[in-house]
Amino acid sequence: MMKERGMRQTVITSFFPSCVPLRLNADVLVHIMRFISSKGELFRMMKTCRSLYLAGLPMMLKNVHLWLDDRTCGLARFCRFMEFDLENRCPLVRNLSISLAFAYEMLECHQTNTMDRFSTVLEHCRNLHSLSLPDGELWLYYGPTSIPRALRALTSMRDLELTLVDDYDATLQLLSNLDLPNLQAISVQHDKDYLHNTDNRIIGNPFEILHNQRSTLEVIRFGPCLPESSSHIYPMAKTIVFSCLAIENINTSALMHSLPNLQRLSLGYLPPHQEDLDRLGRHGEEVLARVHLRNIVHQRDLHLWRQLDAVRGDVLALYALALTCPVRHVQIEESITPGLIPFWTKTLDACRPSAVTMQIDMERFGIKQLPSIISQTAAKGITHLLVDFECQDAAITMDDIMEDIYTLLHSMPLVFLDIHLHYWPDAEQTNPVRVYIHQLNLHTVATEIAKRVPTLQYLTLRRRMEANAFKDDEVSWEIHRNERGTYLAKQFIPYSADDFGMTDVY
């Protein structure tokens, strides 16, 4: 009888674990805590005992992201938490991102005390690797001496990001005086909403502004700017992302001189091209041609980029850049229209890429125009292609579009192909393009492509099926060929461009 009662007790407590003492070892619990992504859940587990609190603190403080507003006074609360054990808590912070976008009133009330306290906390984060401070000039306005002093103490920092909104003279002064021994990446950008409503907001020449960091920087994101000739050389720089406000500001020789070992280049261009050509008047294309020719001539006396792997930008910006060295991957960040084809084909012929990423606006194309988008010279070298066809309200029927796609692909010795067919999510249910894409048999299309492109080994097809702009229907195949014919093996996980070294340049 007593044995049966004991067995019943064991069964009952197994269904109510709170009735029995904790049996898991501490190291197992700590290991579990590493998989908790929610800071709230992690903190609740830390509050159960002192041992788990101490073990969870490095996980809690490793990545700190604060989005402040006037109601929470989050900056003061963060400072108060860190000040409780400044010497032990601050060194645990590795990545710190704080935005003051909605905290203006709070700073007006407590500007001196709060900012000085934060500067002290920041100065003690001696193991900080990454710091992101949107509204950069606001930080310097409230802490004109304390913030620069704190930044100079962050000798372990590798990545610094600042976003500018209004008056940024103080920020540029800070950058000019910056000298951090381990800084590898820096990003200085305008707030996008502010930039589009402001004329001629040029930050300056990044090669002059960042000269103290020229021996350490590997990644530079700067813009809009004027990358003019400079005596400063950045031998470690591998990636640069910048934008210009005018075609005339694109200076290839200045880039080659200051960045001799560049591998990845992203060139943005604001405002949109057509508006800029209109601003230049009737001679807009003549100005573009003159900049293109100038950049070609200036490259003749320079050591060309031998390690340049990837270039990303607008069609006209890349045409003005006028690269004459080989580039493995060329990526276009805008839709190609028939009017851009001459500039696009000349860019491809000069760069001779083996990998291409592009978008095509089919609304502008007529029948048989699509195959001319890549010249026969460039087509012979392209083995990897990612192409996005925007088919909304296409000028020609989808049957003609598909036939033009097959003709275009046939001219290239492709190994990897990624095709995205989509329409805008707000298309009517009866829209013929939407109906066609919705009913399209992807396996039939894949079989036809495999037949037309005998070198193809990996294929991904994507189509937009739902109103949700982020939900795609995508399928990948590995193509096998033998004496019996062609066999398409469907893949469980779709291929991506990253799998084939076609990562975006940002």
Image (spheres, rainbow, N blue to C red):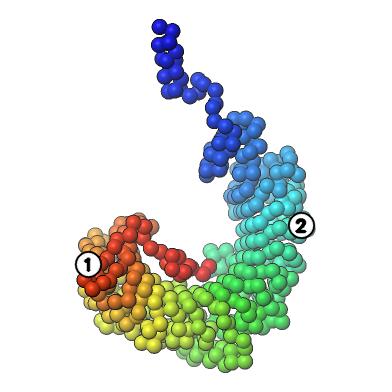
In this view of the protein, can residue 322 be seen by the observer? yes
Residue positioned most to the top:
1
Of circles 1 and 2, the one toward us is 1
Residue occupying the point 40% across, 79% down: 382
Where the N terminus falls, by quadrant?
top left
Q: Residue 205 carries which label?
A: none
Residue 282 position, x and y percent, is 46, 89
Say what amino acid the circle numbered 1 marks.
Thr
Residue occupying the point 64% across, 33% down: 51
Rendered position, 13 above or below 84: above
Q: Nearest the camera: 471 or 173?
A: 471
Tag 2, which secondary structure? loop
Say what amino acid the circle numbered 2 marks.
Ala
Quadrant in which residue 484 is drawn: bottom left
Residue occupying the point 67% across, 75% down: 234
Label 1 vs 2, first from the N-terminus: 2
Q: Nearest the camera: 249 or 300?
A: 300
**In this image, 355 relative to 479: left or right?**
right
Q: How far apart are marks 1 and 2 (CA)?
A: 62 Å
- Label 2 sits on residue: 153
- Label 1 sits on residue: 444
Residue 284 position, x and y percent, is 49, 87
Q: Crowdedness of circle 1 by 10 Å Cα count: few (<14), some, many (20+)?
A: few
Quadrant in which residue 265 is drawn: bottom right
Q: Nearest the camera: 376 or 340?
A: 376
**In this image, 389 relative to 81: left or right?**
left
Tag 1, which secondary structure? helix
Disc 1 to disc 2: CB gap under 8 Å: no
Residue 273 position, x and y percent, is 47, 79
**In this image, 458 relative to 343: left or right?**
left
